[in-house]
Image (cartoon, rainbow, N blue to C red):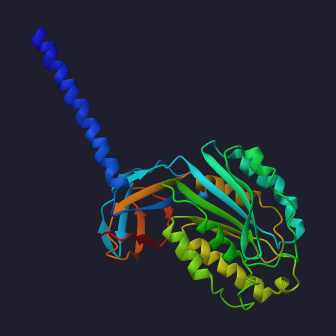
Amino acid sequence: MMKKSNLSRIALMIGTLALAFGFLVTNAVAAGPGTVTTTITAVGKKNTSPPVITKDNVQLFLNKERTQVADLNHGEKLYLAVLIDDSLDSEIAGQWSDLKAFFAAQPDTTYISVAYARNGSAMLAQDFTNDHQLAAKALRIPVGGGALSSPYLALLDLMKRWPSSPDRRSILLISSGIDYFRGDFGIRSPDLDSTISRAQKQNINIWTIYAPDAGHRGRGFFLAFRAQSNLSELSDQTGAESYYLGTSEPVNLKPYFDELSTHLSNQYLLTFKASGGAKGRFEHVRVVPTELPYVEFLVAPQAFLPAVQ
């Protein structure tokens, strides 16, 4: 009986060590050198919540070649930076009650910060906190016409000061999309590409909501339409969505906030092994669902492959 008991204990110890070793290996693959992590957002039919996604439901293609998924997890913790363009028309503040309700509806694992885009910088009003009432207190009326700025320079400033993190990261930008600093009032902002590249490199989704600014030049249809196109491209290229309906003041932002809440609650961190060579490089990425009808993924079309020495 003593021998059988000892053998059982040894077998149990071996099994436990094997499980532990397997867990460590899995996490080493997910976080070790030569690995890339990108955030995917699962979207159900008519923007409803899809079923739970597993690694078997995902196919990853890197430059059209099928690539093995090393890890897929729900990524419970989220850092959400809300960046409000200070040049917006002051009437947008009438929508802040719905924005506060959006804050309150987020889980405790969501850390929210609030900043204002002014003079090409992101002016921090509240650092990341999971006290969502505290974050809501940082909301105020935008300055308006006296705060001409560039949302893209402000985004770059915000992302440069954002420390690296293995968790999900998103920015909600509420802006007209007009670059008063370096834009030519009707053409593509020269800082749009660098903003997109930085977000892709840091795995940050940038969700955008269009709202008109207080300047008279921002009321022109062509300029507003072009600015919306810039915002849409910014979101598409960072694995997010852009929200707008015409070029006038949004009647109600609540449907946008509701949809965004659904998207944020259905995000996953996908990890795969890849080498960016000696210097690192961007590569085309495509992620498609398998055996999941009416489900699609929002994902940045490029991922940065880090240098491997």
Question: Could you tell me residue 102's position as x and y percent?
Answer: 73, 51
Picture layout, residue 70 above or below residue 246: above
Residue placed furthest toward the left: 3
Pick the front one: 68 or 147: 147
Image location of residue 212, percent across then percent down: 82, 75
Is 254 in front, or is 122? Answer: 122
> Is residue 237 or residue 24 the one in the foreground?
24
Residue 290 in view: no
Q: Is residue 262 visible?
A: yes
Q: Give percent across and percent down for residue 252.
A: 81, 61
Q: Measured along the vertical axis of the image, is residue 11 above or below residue 65?
A: above
- Compared with 177, 8 (above or below) is above
**Quadrant of the snapshot with the C terminus:** bottom left
Report whether 53 appears left or right of 157.
left
Q: Quadrant of residue 222?
A: bottom right
Q: Is residue 52 left or right of residue 90?
A: left
Where residue 305 sits: x, y (%)?
Answer: 39, 70
Q: Residue at x 39, y 69 (%)?
A: 306
